[in-house]
Amino acid sequence: MNRGLAQDTHTQGFRPVEKPVEEYALRLGDDALVLSHRLTEWLTRAPDLEEEVALANIALDLLGQARFLLGFAGQSTAQDENLLAFRRGERDYRNALITELPNGDFGHTVIRLLFFSVYQRALYRALAGSADTALAAFAGKALTEVEYHVEYAAGWAVRLGDGTEESHDRAAAAVAQLWPYTAELFSSDELVGALAAEGVAADPAVLHAEWSEQVESVLARATLGVAPTTTWRPGGGRRGLHTEALGYLLAEMQSVHRAHPGAAW
Amino acid sequence: MHEDEHGLEGRGGDARSAQQLDARAVVCAVPDPELPYVTLGDLGVVAAVHEDGYTRSVRVELTPTYLGCPATEVIQRDVENALLDAGWRSVAVVLRFDPPWTPERISATGRAKLAAEGVAPPPRMRPAGHTPVPVFVELGGVRAEVPCPRCGAAQTERLSAFGPAPCQELRRCTACLEPFPAIKSSPVRLR
């Protein structure tokens, strides 16, 4: 694979996963891992101690999801979750772009978490009935945790949106910025289509209907209005085409592993 | 054969030498690293214990409280060490998510120990005819009342849905005003 002139020896240990269901798990696991990292960036910077503990807890839950999903993804190729997390460059990451966008203010984090956790709840509810029993058991477990993420994000979305003029405007700006990126969470391709037909993956169209109804209900309560209409739908993350932000994120996340090859978290 | 109280299977071997203590009892007696006054048995995280007395090997299946709980790795190591100390020669500790751990898996003894330490045990819910369904994103997900573990008052309020450990939230008693940690419960919508 052409990675430019300078070969990154650190990422050479990675080999593409083999089975479609493993590629699917890799996408979901990368979503969880990358957003987990963004949330941990709030440590020592959150508005108050309770929010710091909350964001750290949510990040930890997502990290737990990522450990299972990456471990699942690497089964056929005998690659563990550490190798997949720490020895892949950004072109091999499969997360949706919304998870990698740099943090903004607290309102931005709340709105992103609202969009993402409502998506994850619909996703895991569907996957709890997946034909893949390991994936189904995991999803049933993760679902109970994601309920808390939704509650947290929805609660703060309403408090910020229906709060002061300042908090409302900031939350509204986050909705406007992040909304176009949500489309990628529900985009389908050959792989997802085939897995959904087999009853292994969740049907993105079904997820999107559920998601829209629930998110728009929260936005209405938060006086954040109706969802913006836009035809701009950035994507590409599922194929390894990312914003410049992901490379910086991975450089930081992988720095310890690069300094101490083989280190496990 | 060791069946746990939640109906999970455990296929045991036959002969067990005198030096090898009952594996399930050993595992269940291991203290939780974050809540050391309760054992793994109290918490209900022991899903199954498979003994093979002939090869002196044990396979332990744990159902972790939360996926990202950092105590999980410590627990796996503690279980392994406890079994090796008890005379078992080969120990495998694996995680499984089916059935998922829920607060209902905490035993009556565990609930009493938690309460004695000021950690509110999860409320008893699931009234007959009511099945838990995920709450809608609206804020009004119904959660059962959590009584104050210190003064016993029924009215308490949530300070934060997230607490010192992934399985806990922070609450405050509206009578004695003491804050306290509580084991998280699954949201239910009663209809």
Image: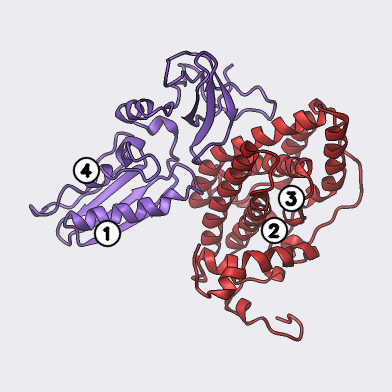
Chain colours: A red, B purple
Q: Position of residue A177 (x, y in %)?
A: 86, 47
Label 4: which residue?
B25
Q: Which one is nearer the viewer's eye here, A196 or B89?
A: B89
Kindly report which numbered mark, 4 or 2, lies closer to the viewer in this rendering.
4
| Furthest residue toward bottom | A5
Which mark is in front, 1 or 3?
1
Residue positioned 65% across, 55% down in the render: A37
Using the numbered discs, state the Cα–Cα distance from disc 1 to disc 2 in whole angstroms.
37 Å
- Tell me whether marks 1 and 4 sit on the same chain: yes
| Residue topped by disc 2 | A95
Q: Which mark is residue B91?
A: 1
Ranked by sequence position, the earlier of labels 1 and 4 is 4
Answer with left or right where residue B116 lies relative to residue A69. left
Q: Are marks 3 and 2 on the same chain?
A: yes
State whether residue A252 is above or below residue B184.
Answer: below
Residue A18 visible in the picture: no
Q: Nearer the viewer, residue B120 or B141?
A: B120
The reply to the same-chain question for discs 4 and 2 is no
Which residue is identified by label 3?
A185
Distance from disc 1 to disc 4, alpha carbons, whole Å, reads 15 Å
C-alpha separation, residue under disc 3 versus residue under disc 2: 9 Å
Is the Cβ of the residue at disc 1 closer than 8 Å to that at disc 2?
A: no
| C-alpha gap between disc 1 and disc 3 | 42 Å
Residue occupying image coordinates x 73% and y 66%: A248
Name the chain letter of the residue that bears numbered label 3.
Answer: A
Q: Work out whether A256 lies above or below A59.
A: below
Looking at the image, is mark 3 or mark 2 nearer the viewer? 2
Label 2 is placed on what type of residue?
Asn
Mark 2 is surrounded, within 10 Å at the Cα level, by few (under 14), some (14 to 19) or many (20 or more) other residues, namely many
**Badge 3 amino acid:** Leu
Q: Would you say A91 lies left or right of B114 here?
A: right
Residue A263: percent from left, percent from top: 50, 70
